[in-house]
Image (cartoon, coloured by chain):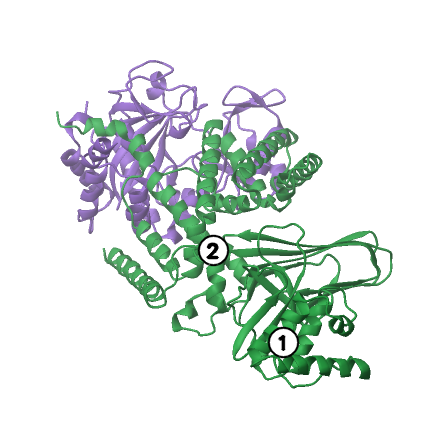
Chain colours: A purple, B green
Amino acid sequence: MIKTWLGLRRAGVLGINERNLRLINDYNPRRLMRLVDDKTETKRLANAAGIQTPELYGLIRSPAEMRKLETLLNHPDGCVIKPANGSQGNGIQVILGPMRGGWRRSNGQRALLEDLKFHVNNILSGMYSLSGQPDIAMIEYRVKFDDVFDPISFGGVPDIRIIVLRGIPFVAMVRLPTAESDGKANLHKGGVGVGLDLVTGRTLYGMQKGKTTDIHPDTANPLSNISVPHWDEMLLMAAKAYDVTGLGYLGADIVLDKGKGPMLLELNARPGLAIQVANRMGVRPLIEACMKADTEGLNAEQRVELGKKLYREHVPDHVLV
Amino acid sequence: MTSTFHTRLLAFVLTAIALTIFGIKVFQYNYPLTPGTQTTTWDFEIYLDFDTANQPVRIETFVPSNSDTRRVSQEQYYNGAFGLRLETDDDNGRKAIWTYRYPNDRKVLRYRARLEGETQRSPLPAEMHRPADRAPPESLNDLERQAFLVWSSDMRRRSADDDSLAELILQEIFVQKDADEIEALLPVLPPPLDRLTLAAEALQSQGIRARVANGVYLDEARRRTEVQHWLEYHVDGRDKRYFIGSDPKEFFTIWYGTEEMIRADGVFDFEPQVSIQPIDSSASDVMRKAARADRTPVELFSFDRLPVTTQLVYQVLITIPAGIVLLVFMRQFIGIETLGTFMPILIGIAFRETALLNGLILFTLLVALGLAMRFYLEKLRLLLVPRLAVVLIFIVICMAVIAQMFNSANMRMGLSISLFPMVILTMTIERMSIMWEEYSPEDAIKAGAGSMLVASLSYLVMTNKHIEFLLFNFPELLLVLMAACLLMGKYTGLRLSEIRRFRELAKEAEPK
């Protein structure tokens, strides 16, 4: 136990306590958190800054607006229903498209209008929102994800998380859905996290449920050495997210659409620490470096370059493939 | 970094203040550090069980009262629908008077209190130190008065001083019982009150202050204890008591005079019951201190000045911070997942009503039932708030059924459940079921178990006699707890659970 503890200290592994105290408390003022907790607000800010997000089809703000639901759902390519204030992917329903008598869910099952109305009602009554507050349901474009991750994902949408400190992207991973996670890319539901080389955008090793793994549990394909397309564009989106929100410590969740390229799904003001396991390294050295770095007058592009430089300097060799 | 310094400074100052007051209390005023080291206290209960017949009921009973020499605390009256009035009469004592105009069926009234007993060495109340006026009792007719005077002057002649006079009178009345003149002088009262009254009157007539005292002997736990009568008198500047038979080690004076303890009008099938039970409680020392007349400046920081009923509330309340410190430790250092932030503390407080094992069983049972209900309701597609309400009502029904079941099985556990806070239960069920769906059953069960663990530990901490004693008698220690929380609020190290979670990373960092 003590040996492990010492090892973790040496590896610079960050714990929740330290994240809460030194990163979230110090860099993310409460009044700014609202901007990312409410996804409609995030979307508005991002679009204004030229960051691409999935197109919003419509909002349902109250049960009285429920009759709009049917028309909002009727896109031949499907759509996604999500709570505006949800967290950790809770309450998200993916609709692949209309089918006879209802809609096809991402798991292939049919959903009746009644089922979806119930789901929206749950969202409105605050079942998925952070503090149980009444919420808004968003219906938006369903991302048709790029097939680059096809060999190493199972159903659902793989997404890329980039963590940004003071506007400097410094660590990233891709989250892959598995059979166990039911098409969701959330790591705590059993998704696979794969570390990314911040400089090249190539996948490194993976982890699932806190254990390292080199292959995808469902497809058995190796996880490493896959290049993420549009990598620099993604880093830039993440760096710009700092400019539009002002949050010093944030996680940008980005998906890659087949036709439209990278899209910002959501921002997270309290990104978790599993990214350390996915990257097989503690992030403290990188965090210290980002804290010390002089970012005065740097634009987003320059901060991306700074992030790459710091990454190259501080990442231990064993991490890179 | 300045905030860290600030926090540490604040924690240090708080601790220093607390320990200074603590030190003064312990070293200068010799406050005891452990509970129940000196005396036992006694649980005293008057239990009145009777039938009524739709006519006005009036029940009077003498109840223990505080004085310079004895101490009552934590008084509780169970009145039912009755009106309660307390009447204090300096000559006799304190009376509780219960009234009700049109009662029907069987009723129960209860009075409970904690007593700290008196011993032969306890001083008599101050009014016993006033001189008595020498006069023969007024209740006698002329003939009896004559006889009384003859007898008492004979006593006086045969004695040397007041002390021996008192001895002689008591000897004459209680030991040589066959003396005819004594028999003739006895007032019409049930024994032993008749002789005691005569003795008191005889002593008073000789200028020795005396009176009949009534109360209970505190010897062992008794479900039905007899009311006892004795004589207290003040002779030659000394306080004395005369007990018929052998002296009790400890006793408690409830009232004076020859009135009956309990008087009831308008009732039948009346069964009064007075019970005593020894408790080795920390409260004994609290009461001991409270009984002291002199007030020291440090006692501003104690609860002794509050009414006893309020003290009882604080005795519970004051231990909650100890549970909270434990919770903070479990979360920040161990990293145990719980449902809600302070939910485990609330559950822990709820366990006070049920005791630990019963509480755990009941809680698990009710949560399981509630969860099952919640999953069934999921099928009906209800809105959130009405669904919560249905679960709440279901829990009330379950609790009622369980209470019935245990009551018919004659187990006390069923009765305590009614006080079990059900809102806590409902919230737990709702949180757990959301976690169940959104994360996984394992996560939900893990968090539920974590909550139970923290709740049990906090219960053990909060009901620990020593912790309760320390915090109640030294409330300044709360500042130390606060300082501990301040310091824990600045802990940035890994949690125990994270050492496990990240253990793979430790291997990576090993020097090759």
Which residue type does callout 2 highlight?
Ser
Label 1 in the same subunit as label 2? yes
Marker disc for residue B282: 2
Above or below for B187 versus B353: below
- Between the residue at mark 1 and the residue at mark 2, the CA separation in whole angstroms equals 35 Å
Q: Is residue A219 left or right of residue B430?
A: left
- Helix, strand or loop at disc 1? strand
Task: Report which residue position mark 1 lands on.
Answer: B210
Whole-percent x, y for residue B33 in the image: 38, 57
Q: x, y (%) of residue A316?
A: 16, 30
The residue at 60%/40% (across/down) is B384
Front residue of B449 and B233: B233
Task: Estimate the x, y position of residue A58 in percent, counting from the top left.
Answer: 52, 39
Graded by Cα atoms within 10 Å as few (under 14), some (14 to 19) or many (20 or more), the crowding at tag 1 reads many
Q: In this rendering, which labeled residue sits more in front, label 1 or label 2? A: 1
Please provide percent x and percent y for residue A276: 27, 32
Q: Callout 2: few (<14), some (14-19), or many (20+) C-alpha neighbours within 10 Å?
A: many
Q: Is residue B190 above or below residue B134?
A: above
- Picture quarter containing residue B507? top left
- Asked if residue B272 lies left or right of residue A253, the reply is right
In this view, A43 is above or below A77: below
Subunit ID for the residue under disc 2:
B
